[in-house]
Amino acid sequence: MRRWSRIACALLFAAISSGCAVPYYLQAIGGQIDLMRKREPIADIVADPSRDADFRRALGTVAELRRFAVTDVHLPDNDSYTSYADLGRSYVVWNVVATEPFSVKPQRWCFPFAGCVSYRGYFDRDTAERFQQRLDERGLDTFSGGSSAYSTLGYFSDPVLNTMLAGSVDNVAGILFHELAHQKVYIQDDSELSEGFATAIEEHGVEMWLRAHGDAAALERYLRRIGRRAQFAELVARQQSRLRSIFAVDTDDASKLAAKAAAFEQMRLDYAVLKEHWGGATDYDGWFAGTLNNATLVAITTYRRWLPGLKWRLREVGLTQFYADVAALAELPRDERVIRLERWDAQSSASGRLPQP
């Protein structure tokens, strides 16, 4: 507890020194300490016959996934994800994203250690939604959504959370690989590259796991799902391009708002066509049932903008060189980094290797 207190004091001092909002940091520090206090060693739970058998098996599988992450995906070997914490809620944090009404570029918030990111996270849903409401009142486009996991980038020994255990094994594996990837390489002030890198490792690692365990049916289902995910991301990217064209025209705000609304209606129609191609799969019906605006698009593209090129590079050079390549990218000035990423994207397009649903 003394160690957490020292870190909390350091974070609060950094917040005050940088002029950041102290209440925001207090909720973040309190939420992190609460999470850490609830940890139990996974090995103890698995070995305890008084605990629920299905729960013990699920955590045993997590331990296998953790070992695979280290030995086969070459992710960090530390104390992260060797403990478990039940938070008693469905999500660990709620992230708020915002844009100007006539822009697809996200607002950015800057923090000690993590740098500048395109979202702001809260451990309490009501607090997140109050912050979102304040941004709404400023006329911004906003989105708020729950997250089942997040990484402290190795500053703490992150536990497995109850929020991470829902769904199939490949879903749990994806979360684990994604969050450990943030500990492997994290690019300050570049959310799109950081999240794209972690997503590339997530999808590659899950495919490796399914192949290693000989589950052909699960592998086929997973490849179809990430194929649909890639095509959905393309749909979102096309919508952003459409909106950029609308916002670039020198017209009055009312005309831009009307054109923006029409563009989102067109996006819904495009999704209906895509679903027919998928045989009626409903993966993103929930997303389309919510409010669509510039910020909801950013919540997707933050993870997907650079993903095709990153996955192409990973296939071409393998894990070891890919890790080195992304670490080298992190050292480049932003303009040079973008040029290299755009080149990888172009090579990905030229290869024509897009997973099919």
Image: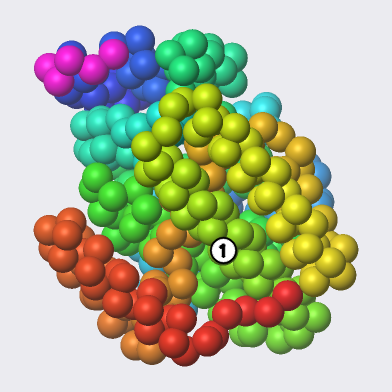
Q: Position of residue 60 (x, y in %)?
A: 66, 59
Image quarter (top left, top right, bottom left or bottom right) of the C terminus:
bottom right
Residue shown at 44% from the left, 49% from the top: 245
Q: Position of residue 304 (x, y in %)?
A: 48, 59
Q: Which residue is mark 1?
A: 234
Stretch in magenta: 17-21
* Amino acid on which disc 1 is placed: Glu
Looking at the picture, tell me which residue is in the foreground, 180 or 80: 180
Left or right: 240, with 55 as reference point: left
Residue 18: in magenta span: yes
Q: How is the image coloured?
A: rainbow
Residue shown at 81% from the left, 51% from the top: 53
- Residue 170's place in the image compared with 55, above or below, is below
- Residue 31's place in the image compared with 236, above or below, is above
Secondary structure beneath dot 1 equals: helix
Any part of residue 31 in sight: no
Quarter location, residue 340? bottom left
Residue shown at 67% from the left, 28% from the top: 89
- Residue 175's place in the image compared with 107, above or below, is below
Left or right: 351, with 273 as reference point: left
Q: Position of residue 239 (x, y in %)?
A: 55, 52
Residue shown at 25% from the left, 31% from the top: 110
Instruction: Say how many tags the image has.
Output: 1
Furthest-right residue in this view: 280
Looking at the picture, tell me which residue is in the foreground, 177 or 237: 237
Would you say the magenta stretch is mainly helix, strand or loop?
Answer: loop
Looking at the picture, tell me which residue is in the foreground, 268 or 227: 268
Looking at the picture, tell me which residue is in the foreground, 57 or 343: 343
Any part of residue 191 in sight: yes
Image quarter (top left, top right, bottom left or bottom right) of the N terminus:
top left
